[in-house]
Image: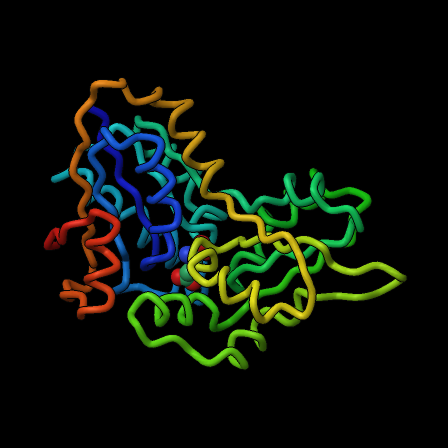
Amino acid sequence: MTRLLVLDSGVGGLTVLSEIRRARPDAEILYLADDAFFPYGGLAEEALVARVVALVEESLRDFPADGVVVACNTASTLVLAPLRARLGIPIVGTVPAVKPAAAASQTKRFSVLATPGTVRRDYTLALIAEHAAGCAVTLVGAPRLAAYAEAELMGAPVPDADLLAEIAPSFVEADGTRTDAVVLACTHYPLLVARFERIAPWLVAWLDPAPAIARRVTNLFGESAADAPPAPAAIRFTSGRTPAPPLAEALAARGLTLARP
Ligand code: DGL
């Protein structure tokens, strides 16, 4: 039986978890929602590394997983190397879909919509330098969007105008070209993509890295056997909170039970 530890600062990584569950329903999963430290996008670099390394090491003691999926772009920009150096199991990170965006964009103008932390990091800038030469790339660090995605899943959606204020800088018209693709470089944002599509100033492709992460998982751990029974998946909120009804229903709909810290 394959066991995977999946983590994010909150419920954003559930967008990744859904794809992993689709690909490997037989893998036992513990999903860590590190809501005690939400949002990661506002944490200083050393604080974020120290927190994630300590949380993963502690969680592996009672859930000895075969691999860890960091279902968070903000954490992945910093913690993959320290985790790999300390743990002898595969660590899968979340990489903004810059390469697919450069390939998909017809206008060669696309945007990377992420947390303020992710857009500042060398990791992101290096990806753009490596994969998006010849493209005009706009980096947008959205200060409140991850919190808005959390609110959406908790049954308290924010008004369209607030969402639009966060995504509007991604839409650029210059030198006769328009943005035609937006990289969702925070795992929380796909939770809002249906609303983004409705309020966007014009049509763009929204790129979600979750399917690529699930492919990476099956590359590392193999496909599920046809006769393998489905395995349980649980979610643990590091704050110890019990989710209120709208969120509890969303978690149950994803087949997740609650695990206590
Ligand atoms: N879901 C996280 C990401 O992919 C970020 C949310 C946060 O700022 O905590 O970047």
Q: Which corner quadrant of the image does residue 44 belong to?
A: bottom left
Q: Quadrant of residue 129?
A: top right
Judge whether 177 appears above or below 233 on screen.
below
Q: Is residue 40 visible?
A: no
Is 139 drawn above or below residue 107 in the view shown? below
Residue 186 position in % (x across, y down): 48, 55
Query: Would you say 187 lies left or right of 122 here?
Result: left
Work out which residue is located at the far right of the displayed protein and give it: 175
Q: Write the residue at 59% across / 69% down.
A: 167
Quadrant field for ligand 1: bottom left
Q: Return the x and y of residue 51 as percentages of the image width and height.
A: 31, 54
Which residue corresponds to the image point at 49% horizontal and 61% vertical from the top-left? 194
Q: Is residue 64 left or right of residue 99?
A: left
Judge whether residue 132 can be spotted in this image. yes
Depth check, front residue: 175 or 73: 175
Q: Residue, x 34% and y 36% (percent of image)?
A: 22
- Foreground pick, 154 / 261: 154
- Closer to us: 244 or 85: 244
Residue 111: x percent and y percent?
67, 57
What is the total number of numbered labels drawn onto the structure image?
Answer: 0
Which coloring applies here?
A: rainbow
Q: Residue 34: image x %, image y %?
A: 28, 57
Residue at screen point 24% across, 53% down: 253
Q: Is 155 on the left or on the right of 228, as rendered?
A: right
Q: Quadrant of the N terminus?
A: top left
Give the residue at the far front of this rendering: 198
For the C terminus, give its image quadrant. Answer: bottom left
